[in-house]
Image (cartoon, rainbow, N blue to C red):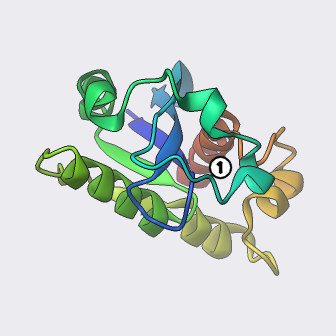
Amino acid sequence: MTNFAAIDFETADYHSDSACSVGVVHVKDNSIAERYHRLIRPPRREFVFTYIHGLTWNDVRDSPSFGELWPELRHLLDRADFLVAHNASFDSRVLGACCRLAGISPPRYRFLCTVSMARKMWKLRSARLPVVCQHLGIALEHHDALSDAEACAKIAMRALG
């Protein structure tokens, strides 16, 4: 029985605690059971990565902070046996930094990385998310947190069989 959650964060700036969007896709028994997407108000108004994800301060200023969002996000993540992310070290670092900033003890989730899975399974020249998705025929709106999380979930489902 497969029970995991794919997670993707988008950040506003160079700091790991600047999550401005999160997408989570919960997979149960090798099918998508739930999709979750929220905008997050980061701790600073500066948006360096708008050119990547298209989000600005005006998009998120009325959104909850990570600390305010954490109870519902944690409820979703705690139901999974493990988490997957494309470049899991990044998303794990963002999760931990956002928790610490909010005064929350970072949970110790087990992360699997779909970059590593893709390299082992399909031996592609590049394991970038758009490349893997194109190879597998997975639709992707790159740098949309929910789309990235769903693509990651589909990669993991294929890799884990």
Above or below residue 97? Residue 21 is above
On screen, residue 49 versus residue 14, left or right, reads: right
Residue sitting at x 13%, y 46%: 103
Residue sitting at x 74%, y 67%: 128
Q: Quadrant of residue 15?
A: bottom left
On screen, residue 145 versus residue 68, left or right, reads: right
Q: Residue furthest front?
A: 45
Of the pair 121 and 147, the residue shown nearer to us: 147
Of the pair 65 and 113, the residue shown nearer to us: 65
State the residue position of label 1.
Answer: 155
Residue sitting at x 20%, y 54%: 100
Residue 48, position as x, y percentages in the image = 65, 60
Residue 12, position as x, y percentages in the image = 57, 52
Residue sitting at x 70%, y 36%: 147
**Residue type highlighted by circle 1:** Ile
Mark 1 burial class by Cα count in 10 Å: few <14, some 14-19, many 20+: many
Of the pair 70 and 123, the residue shown nearer to us: 70
The quarter of the rendered structure image containing the N terminus is top left
On screen, residue 38 versus residue 17, left or right, reads: right
Residue 9, position as x, y percentages in the image = 52, 47
How many dots with numbers? 1
> Please, what secondary structure does the residue beneath circle 1 have?
helix
Q: Quadrant of residue 86?
A: bottom right
Of the pair 1 and 90, the residue shown nearer to us: 90
Q: Residue furthest bottom?
A: 125
Residue 80, position as x, y percentages in the image = 31, 34
